[in-house]
Image (cartoon, rainbow, N blue to C red):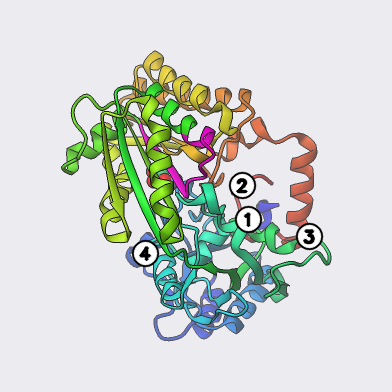
Amino acid sequence: MTNSLVSSLTPAHLRFLEGLFPGGDLVTDPAAMAVYGADSSRRAAMPFAVARPREEGQVVELLKWAEAEAVPIVPRARGTGMSGGAVPVCGGVVVSCLHLNRVLDIDADDFCAEVEPGVVTAEFQALTQKRGLFYPPDPASLKISTLGGNVATCAGGMRAVKYGVTRDYVLGVRAVLPGGRIMDAGGRSHKNVVGLDLTRLFVGSCGTLGLITKMTLKLLPLPEGSATVLAGFASLPAALEGARGVFRAGVLPTAMEFMDSKACWAIGQIRDVPWGAQTQAVLVLKVDGGKAALAAEMARLEAALAPAAPLCLFKGLGPKEEEPLWELRRLVSPAGFRLGPDKLGEDVAVPRGKTAQAVEGFQAIGAEQGVQVACYGHLGDGNIHVNIFYDAADEGQRQRAQASKEAVFRLTLSLGGTLSGEHGTGITKGPYVQWQLGEEERRLMAGIKQVFDPSGILNPGKGWS
Ligand code: 2HG
Ligand code: ZN
């Protein structure tokens, strides 16, 4: 499908784009464009041009033109994605949604909001909070990432244990399709079973089906309070036992995160950490709800962790005290590079009951291959970040890292898991999609792509099709 796409822009193409995106909204200078060709996967490619629309009408005209001229179109937000989904591997026009950044409505009666894709996630959450409302999805990059990027990738985050992921909060999507067609799926009703669920289809489709111009998001009442526990354990099995104890006690935490010894070590290289040298694994748990019930919930949490004999336990009551504990957890991703200059960052997920087996297996793979493997992340969802560190300049290490990644994938699939819990397939996992998806499923996905994007102009070279 991608064979017939253009491999550069003609002077006539550039004239068209300059007319549509006046006053600096078209970027063609290579130095200025480079940043739009990279994302947090640390992969990069150079686009032919970058367009920054301010109105949906510009997106409509752009996609009419792009389909007629067979120009690749790569949607982009803040580039915090971890799997190269925003990297323009076939060149083309990168379309930044950052100027489409209006919060159109926040409605406390309908419990929903209407937003444009370029709104920053944390800023939106702050606005909803002021109205006594709550938007739960909280990817680690929420201070930078946008709602459009979150929806395009179905971002997960820490609070997914209790509240689910981005997909569970998207009531409607308006998007421009190739040829300039407009899809307006879903709406402000919290229930809707008329026709196929095009809204859900769009969430996580990584810009391969259309360019989102507006989203209707579901909101919840703001919980009255929250509290966090950070506990250190003498071994990883003890921490995993503690986590099982929490679920067995019937507590559904808002978040249940873990960090293994390598992750803990890496954080200790850049911050003062509250746990001692004997600590080999850390759990961070959050609960939320009515203030009266919170103290009892915290007591249940502590009692559930006690049989696993935590070496230390720190509590934060309310956002001010909780934030420093969560900041430590969010630091693992950047701090990890103390373990090696390059990384393969995986985010496999397994059924909850298989989590301990998976994490212990991933660590054993690292030990066998002689590479540094840090495991951490969303334990409560069975969604484990397996970060494999190596030095790309050392060919032997590079090959062992690659072998470790494939062994991690094989173990995950043998446990009934999935190659990506929240980062998506992008370009880093593209070649492995066939390991997980059967022929029939891939055929159906290719058929769906064909319906939305018959010329294959949207984010070519990505995903599953
Ligand atoms: C997190 O949970 C992010 O911290 C980043 O999803 C994970 O860097 C990573 O692999
Ligand atoms: Zn994560």
Does label 4 point to a residue whose CB lies under 8 Å from ligand 1?
no
Q: Which amino acid does label 4 sit on?
A: Pro
Task: Give the crowd class for mark 1: few <14, some 14-19, many >=20 residues within 10 Å.
Answer: many
Secondary element at tag 1: loop
Q: Which residue is label 4 attached to?
A: 30
Q: How far apart are marks 3 and 1 (CA)?
A: 14 Å
Tell me, yes or no, whether the highlighted magenta stretch contains residue 251.
yes
Instruction: Report x, y in % for residue 329.
Output: 33, 45
Figure check: 437 above or below 66: above
Q: Which residue is label 2 attached to?
A: 463
Which residue sits at x=29%, y=55%? 323
Which residue sits at x=47%, y=36%? 246
Q: How far apart are marks 1 and 4 (CA)?
A: 28 Å
| Residue 451 numbered mark, or none | 3
Where does the magenta region start and end? 246-259
Figure check: 332 above or below 318: above
Mark closest to the chain's N terminus, 2 or 4: 4
Of circles 3 and 1, which is in front? 1
Task: Give the crowd class for mark 2: few <14, some 14-19, many >=20 residues within 10 Å.
Answer: many
Of circles 1 and 4, which is in front? 1
Q: How far apart are marks 3 and 2 (CA)?
A: 16 Å
Q: Nearer the viewer, residue 12 or 197?
A: 197
Which residue sits at x=40%, y=13%? 368
Figure check: 173 above or below 258: below
Instruction: Report x, y in % for residue 227.
Output: 36, 53
Q: Distance between the residues labelled 2 and 4?
A: 27 Å
Q: Which amino acid does label 3 sit on?
A: Val
Mark closest to the chain's N terminus, 3 or 1: 1
Q: Which residue is label 1 attached to?
A: 205
Secondary element at tag 4: helix
Q: Are marks 1 and 2 in contact (CB under 8 Å)?
A: yes
